[in-house]
Image (tube, rainbow, N blue to C red):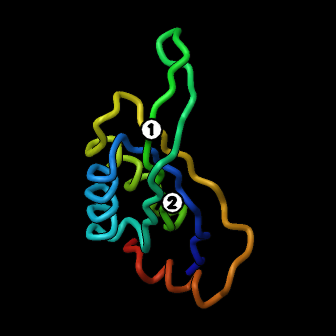
């Protein structure tokens, strides 16, 4: 059995309420081992031809590459944005005990 590599997924949300609800749903479904909710983010971006700026809440989601497709589907289904940010970044190094906890916390 090969070990799935761990990843951090970035997802922005419009409010803390939405962010906490989404984070709890991902952990409850065993799609994420841990979700950090970071409020008071200011995002500047282009949307439908206009430069926008808004306050958002950032989720830092710890999961595995194997779980990412199901996690992505869940975020798309639960998220209020038309096109939510869902970006997976590889974890290139970390404490082996923590990374093992992530792997065992996320269902296959």
How far apart marks 2 and 1 lie (CA) works out to 16 Å
- Work out whether residue 85 or residue 43 is closer to the camera in this orientation and state it: 43
- Work out whether residue 5 or residue 1 is closer to the camera in this orientation and state it: 5
Could you say whether the residue bearing mark 2 is in a helix, strand or loop?
Answer: strand
Q: Residue 12 occupies which quadrant of the picture? A: top left
- Is 22 rendered above or below residue 95? above
Percent of width and height locating residue 14: 36, 40
Percent of width and height locating residue 44: 57, 29
Percent of width and height locating residue 88: 57, 52
- Is 67 rendered above or below residue 101? above
Identify the residue shown where x is 30% and y is 55%: 22
Tell me the residue that label 1 is attached to: 55
Numbered disc in front, either 2 or 1: 1
Q: Reading the chain from its start, which is encountered first: label 2 or label 1?
A: 1
Q: Quadrant of the N terminus?
A: bottom right
| Outermost right residue | 93
Tell me the residue that label 2 is attached to: 60
5 lies left or right of 24: right
């Amino acid at each position: 059995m090969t070990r799935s590599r761990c990843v951090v997924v970035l997802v922005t949300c419009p409010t803390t309420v939405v962010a906490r609800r989404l984070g709890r749903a991902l952990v409850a479904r065993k799609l994420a081992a841990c979700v950090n909710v970071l409020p008071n983010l200011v995002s500047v971006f282009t949307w439908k031809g206009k430069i926008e700026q808004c306050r958002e809440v950032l989720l830092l989601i710890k999961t595995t590459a194997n779980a990412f497709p199901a996690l992505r589907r869940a975020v798309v289904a639960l998220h209020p944005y038309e096109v939510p940010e869902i970006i997976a970044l590889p974890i290139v190094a970390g404490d082996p005990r923590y990374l093992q906890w992530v792997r065992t916390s996320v269902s296959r």
